């Protein structure tokens, strides 16, 4: 059961990280389009700035699962390294429960906010509902919950090793 969950978590985290990278490419590309349209062609486009903002929100919420999974929160990692060995598993359980509680709140209110945004259109992209911008919160939070549980089952504390 644990192995199956960790395999699922690995695939989900890989997917969310790939999508977060794609959103970074979209944001950077649309930023370049905005610069070219505004300063080269002197025809500013209202839609490219909106796409950049939405892509950045999606990028953050799709990137959070990887940060949770790999224990890439430096303050938590430092606390874990300085705690006595007997206290570490208790600390991990407390961090997991608090993280899950926060993510549940974000998912709950994010979904509520997305539902309320269905009737609102995106300025510059009138054919899209704000639902598609706001739904990043619950989707990213649910993905992150899987990463939090995965990190509890198979702890990784790699923040200091990957810091450059």
Image (cartoon, rainbow, N blue to C red):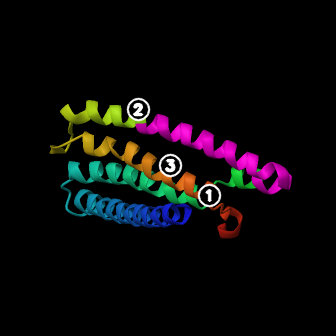
Disc 2 crowd, CA 10 A, few/some/many (<14, 14-19, 20+): some
Find the residue positioned furthest to the left.
127
User: Does the magenta run of residues contain 103?
Assistant: yes
Q: Residue 153, labelled with which disc?
A: 1
Helix, strand or loop under label 3: helix
The local crowd at label 3, few if under 14, some if 14 to 19, many if 20 or more residues have their Cα within 10 Å, is: many
Q: Dot 3 corresponds to which residue?
A: 145
- Nearest to the eye among marks 1 and 2: give it: 1
> How far is disc 1 from disc 2 in space, using C-alphas?
27 Å
Picture residue at 20% right of the left edge, 52% below the top: 45
Residue 80 % position (x, y) = 76, 53
Sequence-first disc among 1 and 2: 2
The quarter of the displayed image where residue 30 is located: bottom left
Q: Which residues are magenta?
A: 80-107
> Is 122 rendered above or below residue 76?
above
Question: What is the C-alpha distance between the residues marked 2 and 3?
Answer: 15 Å
């Amino acid at each position: 059961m644990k192995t199956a969950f960790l395999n699922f978590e690995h695939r989900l985290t890989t997917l969310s990280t790939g999508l977060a990278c794609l959103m970074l490419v979209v944001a950077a590309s649309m930023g370049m389009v905005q610069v070219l349209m505004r300063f080269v062609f002197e025809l500013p486009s209202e839609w490219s700035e909106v796409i950049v903002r939405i892509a950045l929100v999606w990028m953050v919420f799709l990137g959070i699962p990887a940060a949770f999974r790999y224990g890439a929160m430096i303050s938590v990692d430092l606390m874990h390294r300085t705690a006595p060995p007997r206290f570490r598993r208790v600390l991990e359980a407390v961090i997991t429960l608090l993280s899950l509680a926060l993510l549940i709140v974000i998912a709950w209110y994010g979904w509520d906010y997305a539902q309320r945004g269905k009737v609102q259109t995106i300025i510059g992209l009138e054919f899209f509902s704000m639902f598609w911008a706001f739904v990043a919160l619950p989707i990213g939070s649910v993905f992150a919950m899987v990463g939090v549980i995965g990190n509890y089952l198979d702890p990784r504390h790699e923040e200091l090793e990957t810091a450059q």
